[in-house]
Image (cartoon, rainbow, N blue to C red):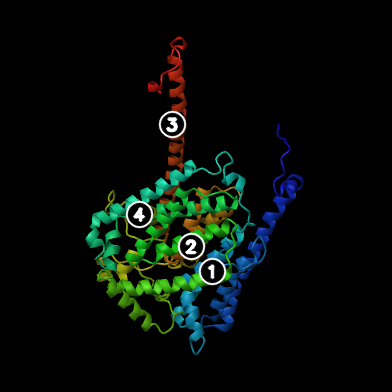
């Protein structure tokens, strides 16, 4: 009989002997760190008063965004995939990269008055981001492999594996249905703007990409967990994961850079949270590759629908025209919108907080409510470029700008704090928790991977992504239960048939003939 003396889990003795002290110490440390960061927030106005022309706001913003990494619960560290570094860096790209680059290359080392006003708003958002990331920081935990790799079926394809593969297939089916509504021939021949217009009002179908993304990350984590346990990976798991990942290349054909980048980022975040060390040099190479990929796709989509040769020529010509690769057009446009909103204050909301209320109302599918409110990006487009808006265009309405339109500087700080804490930091904590299931980790990192994309977007888009990922998670859980019941039913049915056949045979009839077997 095996011994009942089980080895203590790592840290069990400390938890058993000094639990009250542990529970008292950790919150006190977070409170102290958060108060220090809050005190640091007063530095920006002081520096701006002394230096002027946006210099003070810029220095204060950089100090605030570095603070969460320095006040990290596991000790000071700057790593691009740590939540305390990753989230502030994503916010930095959305509001501060472009003006700081302009500040550095200017002769006077200063910003214009309009840009200085926008930097003040960006600084308010940095306060919210730094406070949220510092307050929620937690020590990193190693995954519990004994829980993640079931001992009763260590080498088998699990019911949850089959369920997640089915979820990915449903996602592919939704995307295929969307393409079928357009027509395959027209889909591959229309330009970039028409492609975006065809997706308007069809979020239920295009949301299939989020289902596929959850499947990709889950299957990747399944492979990693089996490898860590020294076990063989079922072929269906690795093959399905590869096929789902390759399907994201379709977005490149559509001229969309984001989906493939966010999927790769989701995998990287999942690997980092799982304890896989990724060297910073490889991360740097990946960032350069993403930059080059984005430039090529942006150049190619100018001739989208005109054939592969025309797109390659367009991408090559676009690369030749670039004088400074550090000047990223997308980031410049996002910051230009912030400058416009702060200085011109367009009348696109009727009352404070309207866009936050509408963000939940817009979740109602358009086929069910054709007159649902317009998103803030569409309203801004109607105000600044009505002709484009009539064709379905929308300009990137960053979270900082949305918060400012609703409640001024306080609104920016609140919206960025909610984005950073609720939608990005907490999912990454779930992904890095010791006992988190693989499916929860996959959904969490998929949500957190949209940090930059949603800092440059509005609440409406983030809620849509969250709902899509929640549906994917719920579908995987329900399908897992269905697959489990089916497997158990089939397993029980076979032996029952054999036993019932043996009972019906009278022993006095003798053994069965060879023909009856």
Image quadrant holding the C terminus, namely top left
Q: Position of residue 179 (x, y in %)?
A: 28, 56
Q: Nearer the viewer's eye, disc 2 or disc 3?
A: 3
- Can residue 330 be spotted in the picture? no
Instruction: Compare marks 3 and 1 and give the one earlier in the sequence.
Output: 1
CA separation, marks 3 and 1?
Answer: 47 Å
Report the residue at 44% width, 38% height from top.
483
Mark 4 lies on a secondary structure that is loop
Taking the image as shown, residue 476 lies to the left or right of residue 18, namely left
The residue indicated by pointer 2 is 265
Alpha-carbon neighbours of circle 1 within 10 Å: few (<14), some, or many (≥20)? Answer: some
Q: Are marks 2 and 1 in contact (CB under 8 Å)?
A: no
Asked whether 374 or 85 is in front, the reply is 85
- Place residue 199 in its image quadrant: bottom left
Report the residue at 68% width, 61% height from top.
32
Q: Are marks 2 and 4 in contact (CB under 8 Å)?
A: no
Asked whether 140 or 124 is in front, the reply is 140
Instruction: Compare marks 1 and 4 and give the one earlier in the sequence.
Output: 1
Q: Position of residue 410 (x, y in %)?
A: 50, 65
CA separation, marks 2 and 1?
Answer: 10 Å
The residue indicated by pointer 1 is 283
Taking the image as shown, residue 55 lies to the left or right of residue 70, namely left
Taking the image as shown, residue 206 lies to the left or right of residue 116, namely left
Residue 438 sits above or below residue 384 on the image: above
Taking the image as shown, residue 217 lies to the left or right of residue 4, namely left
The residue indicated by pointer 4 is 362
CA separation, marks 1 and 4?
Answer: 37 Å
Q: Position of residue 360 (x, y in %)?
A: 39, 53
Q: Nearer the viewer's eye, disc 2 or disc 4?
A: 2
Alpha-carbon neighbours of circle 2 within 10 Å: few (<14), some, or many (≥20)? Answer: some
Mark 2 lies on a secondary structure that is helix
């Amino acid at each position: 009989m095996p011994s009942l003396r089980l080895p203590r889990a790592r840290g069990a003795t400390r938890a058993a002997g000094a639990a009250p002290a542990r529970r008292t110490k950790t919150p006190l440390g977070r409170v102290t760190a958060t108060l220090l960061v809050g005190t640091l927030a007063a530095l920006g106005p002081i520096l701006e008063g002394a230096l002027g022309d946006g210099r003070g706001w810029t220095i204060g913003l950089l100090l605030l965004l570095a603070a969460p990494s320095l006040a990290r619960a596991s000790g000071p560290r700057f790593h691009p995939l740590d939540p305390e570094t990753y989230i502030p860096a994503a916010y930095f790209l959305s509001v501060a990269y472009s003006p700081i680059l302009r500040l550095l290359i200017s002769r006077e080392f200063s910003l214009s008055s309009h840009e200085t006003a926008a930097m003040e708003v960006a600084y308010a958002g940095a306060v919210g981001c730094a406070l949220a990331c510092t307050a929620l920081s937690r020590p990193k935990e190693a995954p519990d492999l004994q829980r993640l790799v079931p001992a009763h079926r260590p080498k088998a394809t699990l019911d949850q594996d089959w369920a997640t593969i089915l979820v990915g297939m449903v996602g592919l089916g939704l995307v295929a249905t969307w393409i079928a509504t357009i027509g395959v021939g027209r889909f591959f021949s229309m330009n970039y703007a028409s492609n975006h217009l065809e997706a308007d009002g069809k979020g239920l179908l295009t949301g299939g990409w989020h289902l596929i993304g959850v499947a990709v990350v889950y299957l990747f984590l399944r492979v990693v967990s089996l490898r860590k346990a020294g076990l063989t990976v079922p072929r269906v798991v690795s093959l399905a994961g590869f096929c789902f990942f390759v399907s994201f290349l379709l977005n490149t054909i559509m001229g969309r850079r984001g989906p493939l980048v966010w999927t790769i980022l989701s995998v990287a975040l999942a690997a980092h949270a799982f304890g896989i060390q990724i060297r910073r040099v490889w991360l740097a190479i990946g960032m350069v590759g993403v930059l080059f990929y984005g430039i090529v796709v942006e150049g190619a989509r100018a001739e989208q629908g005109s054939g592969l040769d025309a797109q390659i020529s367009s991408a090559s010509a676009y690369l030749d025209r670039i004088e400074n690769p550090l000047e990223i057009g997308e980031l410049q446009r996002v910051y230009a919108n912030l400058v416009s909103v702060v200085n011109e204050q367009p009348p696109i909301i009727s009352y404070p907080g309207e866009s936050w209320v509408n963000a939940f109302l817009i979740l109602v599918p358009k086929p069910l409510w054709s007159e649902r409110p317009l998103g803030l990006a569409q309203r801004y487009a109607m105000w600044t470029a009505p002709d484009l808006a009539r064709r379905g265009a929308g300009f990137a309405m960053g979270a900082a700008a949305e918060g400012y339109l609703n409640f001024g500087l306080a609104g920016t700080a609140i919206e960025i704090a909610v984005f950073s804490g609720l939608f990005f930091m907490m999912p990454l904590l779930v992904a890095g928790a010791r006992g988190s299931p693989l499916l929860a980790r996959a959904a969490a990192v998929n949500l957190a991977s949209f940090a930059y994309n949603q800092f440059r977007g509005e609440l409406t888009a983030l809620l849509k992504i969250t709902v899509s990922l929640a549906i994917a998670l719920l579908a995987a859980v329900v399908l897992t239960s269905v697959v489990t019941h089916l497997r158990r039913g089939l397993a029980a049915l076979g032996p029952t048939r054999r036993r019932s056949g043996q009972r019906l045979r009278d022993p006095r009839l003798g053994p069965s003939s060879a023909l009856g077997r």
